[in-house]
């Protein structure tokens, strides 16, 4: 609410007065959804009018809050939030008090209720623990034709300024003519803003406004510094393509703001000017024709909303989760869900690497040999996609590196949103050699009463690791022998106290990721002191676990780019361990015949996902602490420059010189 209000109150300040003609009808429009049906881009307030057409409904609130509150029983970090330790104190929240507050607040619309719940859970800053009502979040993404970046004239992190991304014309043109023609139709010249130096945003110092977005919009990452980098535009790989995020300032997932006022100096000018820049909302939901069909297609629960009983309905994990792994086990996943269509925007071709790929792969890893002929680069875009190909691509890259006599390796983890837990452990062991033994962390789930009943019931029913995650043989003792089918690792629980609250865990266990699908070298093929990692700190989940393993066990050189001048950025963004989507948890409960238990959450009546962090990874440095709460800073922090923020190859060449020579 705060930032929307601030932006509106300053929207009229300025020399280039501008107003979006969002027909504000004098009589309430009986169907604001019908007005915008079929359009790809709409004025944000028109989109918002459609989202706000559904009145508040107490039945839906009770349904949602009952599910949310019982899923929180499984959330490993609930009690850490009561007093989130420094430097993560910004995330402190009393989760049960917030639920009670939302249960007793008066809301005018269903949107207002969902937005309040969404903001509270987003601001826990854990990408594994998110409330995503499909009706309201990412149905429309708001886009400002002025994505921002923080750049230095040199790589010195302390001297940077905020700019409109110099490549914003090349980037946003890729959104297509429906986007650009809107600005033509209102005679708003956004192209001239590219590269402008930003002096203020919404009347505030630009970094203060960036902090506000990092605090209220970004979510996903416990560390404020990492969220600062989410606010800016940055390069990444989506699926298997080079892409550029527009960032959370220019691409928020809810269309609740029509414009934002900047004070800036355009390229080629020396005179500051004030420009009010309109947002435009991009529809990404399921098509509709009026409010009834908007609700039916986007908001009402559907056949995929809730979980199933695998004993009678088969597995919901038809494809992605059932990738060939060890013994057909379900593959645990740790990832964030990147919302928004920035997903669809490619990194403009002219900024993509020009070097030939080593054994050009169609997968999530892009590998190169730099012109110095000594440095191999692996840009690991995620740990998702094809489970086996990730491993064979790694082998091919190393064959290529070996043939070329490469002696050092740079791994780029920029905007890596995580993925299969076992692929993080694979890359760790492939680099460090099988001689290191177990390549992961000690792990636990929460020891609540329903979790205990689930494991007891799974054992009684003979449920297996290819059906449910709670099945004991999914996990192993510390000597890496799998738990027997009858080993109830939730009984007895292990005492744990955090912030003065008793919060027992399951017994500790290891993941079972080995044997991998490719042979693992016994010793490092490239000496680990010649391996370095670069990223922007937006390294989520499995990515955070991989980089933490490299830091904690091998003291790997890690460099983070970006951040505010002089403010540290952690190299791991969000280091939960395994995430369960709402359907996953509900499937565990239904398959264990416990859906009628008084502690079980009800089926959702709306098309939403409430995912949560289900497992903890305990730090090697201090096995009483989850790695999520261990502050680990990179050895190096650099500013992006206009040469590197959108140009991975330039960044790698800079990093190779700086980190290795
Ligand atoms: C523009 O939007 C219309 C719907 O309003 C859509 O049919 C058309 O395909 C879009 N054009 C492009 C180039 O995306
Ligand atoms: C509230 O939602 C429930 C569940 O979808 C529905 O049955 C009921 O009709 C709604 N109430 C009103 C007043 O619309
Ligand atoms: C919300 O408050 C009502 C009234 O006090 C109570 O009956 C209900 O159980 C509460 N719902 C949740 C989810 O806590
Ligand atoms: C590519 O992969 C093949 C087989 O994995 C390997 O023999 C070759 O050395 C690799 N490198 C190059 C540059 O082709
Ligand atoms: C980056 O900025 C410098 C001046 O600071 C300029 O000389 C150079 O051309 C710019 N490079 C790019 C890629 O825009």
Image (tube, rainbow, N blue to C red):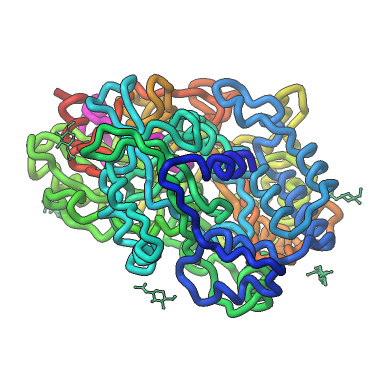
Q: Residue drawn at (75%, 36%), measured in percent from left and top?
A: 492
Residue 36 visible to the viewer: yes
Identify the image quadrant of residue 76. Answer: top right
- Magenta-span inclusion, residue 523: yes
Quarter occupied by the N terminus? top right
Q: Answer above or below: position of 26 versus 289.
A: above
Q: Which residues are magenta?
A: 519-543
- Quarter of the image holding residue 342? bottom left
> How many marks are shown on the rendered structure?
0
557 on left or right of 96: left
Q: Position of residue 230 (x, y in %)?
A: 44, 40
Q: Look at the picture and state if 406 lies above or below 420.
A: above
Percent position (x, y) of residue 3? 58, 40
Main structural element of the magenta stretch: helix, strand or loop? Answer: loop
Question: Between residues 268 and 380, which one lies in front from this camera angle?
Answer: 268
Q: Is residue 521 magenta?
A: yes
Q: Is residue 334 left or right of residue 184?
A: right
Vertical comparison of 94 with 75: above or below: above
The residue at the point 28 percent across, 48 percent down is 192
Q: State the residue in front, 231 or 575.
A: 231
Query: Looking at the image, which residue is at 43% across and 33% down?
Result: 200
> Residue 572 placed where, x, y %?
44, 33
Q: Of 263 and 3, which appears nearest the observer? A: 263
Q: Quadrant of the C terminus?
A: top left
As drawn, is 179 to the left or to the right of 129? left
Q: Is residue 575 visible?
A: no
State whether residue 514 is above or below residue 387.
above
């Amino acid at each position: 609410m705060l930032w929307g209000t601030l932006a509106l109150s300053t929207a009229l300040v300025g020399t280039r007065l501008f107003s979006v003609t969002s027909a504000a009808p004098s009589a309430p429009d009986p169907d604001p959804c019908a007005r915008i049906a079929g359009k790809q881009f709409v004025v944000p307030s028109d989109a918002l009018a459609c989202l706000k057409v559904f009145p508040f409904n107490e039945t839906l609130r009770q349904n949602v809050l009952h599910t949310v509150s019982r899923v929180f029983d499984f959330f490993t970090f609930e009690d850490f939030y009561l007093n989130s330790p420094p430097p993560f104190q910004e995330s402190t929240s009393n989760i049960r008090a917030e639920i009670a507050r939302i249960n007793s607040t008066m809301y005018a619309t269903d949107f207002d209720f969902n937005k309040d719940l969404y903001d509270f859970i987003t601001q826990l800053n854990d990408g594994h623990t998110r409330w995503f009502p499909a009706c309201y979040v990412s149905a429309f993404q708001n886009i400002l034709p002025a994505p921002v970046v923080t750049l230095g004239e040199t790589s010195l992190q302390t001297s940077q300024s905020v700019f409109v991304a110099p490549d914003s014309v090349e980037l946003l043109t890729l959104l297509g003519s429906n986007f650009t023609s809107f600005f033509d139709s209102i005679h708003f010249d956004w192209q001239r803003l590219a590269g402008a130096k930003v002096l203020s945003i919404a009347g505030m110092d630009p970094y203060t406004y960036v902090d506000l977005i990092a605090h209220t919009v970004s979510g996903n990452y416990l560390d404020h510094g990492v969220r600062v980098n989410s606010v800016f535009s940055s390069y990444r790989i989506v699926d298997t393509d080079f892409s550029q995020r527009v960032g959370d300032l220019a691409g928020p997932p809810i269309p609740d703001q029509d414009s934002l006022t900047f004070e800036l100096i355009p390229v080629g000018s020396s005179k500051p000017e004030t420009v009010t820049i309109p947002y435009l909302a991009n529809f990404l939901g399921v098509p509709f024709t009026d409010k009834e069909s908007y609700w039916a297609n986007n908001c009402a629960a559907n056949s995929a909303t809730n979980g199933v009983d695998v004993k009678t309905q088969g597995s919901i994990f038809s494809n992605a989760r059932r990738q060939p792994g060890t013994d057909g086990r379900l593959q645990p996943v740790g990832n964030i869900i990147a919302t928004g269509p920035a997903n669809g925007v490619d990194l403009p071709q002219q900024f993509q690497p020009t070097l030939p790929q080593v054994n050009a792969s169609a997968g999530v890893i892009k590998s190169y040999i730099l012109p110095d002929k000594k440095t191999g680069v692996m840009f690991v875009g995620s740990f998702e996609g094809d489970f086996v190909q990730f491993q064979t691509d790694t082998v091919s890259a190393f064959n290529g590196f070996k043939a070329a006599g490469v002696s050092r390796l740079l791994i780029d983890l920029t905007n890596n949103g995580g993925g299969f837990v076992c692929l993080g452990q694979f890359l760790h062991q492939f680099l460090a050699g099988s001689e290191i033994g177990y390549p992961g962390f000690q792990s636990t789930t929460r020891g609540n009463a329903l979790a205990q009943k689930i494991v007891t019931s799974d054992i009684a029913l003979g449920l297996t690791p290819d059906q449910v995650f709670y099945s004991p043989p999914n996990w192993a003792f510390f000597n890496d022998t799998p738990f027997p089918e009858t080993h109830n690792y939730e009984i007895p629980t292990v005492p744990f106290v955090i912030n003065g609250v008793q919060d027992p865990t399951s017994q500790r266990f290891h993941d079972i990721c080995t044997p991998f699908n490719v042979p693992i070298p016994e010793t490092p093929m490239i000496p680990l002191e010649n391996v370095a990692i670069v990223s922007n700190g937006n390294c989520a989940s499995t990515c955070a676990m991989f980089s933490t393993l490299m830091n904690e066990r091998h003291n790997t050189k890690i460099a983070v780019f970006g951040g505010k001048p002089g403010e540290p950025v952690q190299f791991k963004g969000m280091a939960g361990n395994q995430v369960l989507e709402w359907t996953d948890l509900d499937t565990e409960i239904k398959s264990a015949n416990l859906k009628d238990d008084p502690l079980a959450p009800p089926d959702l009546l709306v098309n939403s996902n409430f995912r949560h962090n289900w497992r903890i990874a305990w730090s090697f440095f201090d096995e009483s602490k989850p790695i999520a709460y261990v502050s680990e800073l990179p050895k190096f922090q650099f500013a992006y420059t206009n040469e590197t923020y959108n140009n991975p190859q330039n960044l790698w060449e800079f990093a190779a010189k700086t980190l290795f020579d």
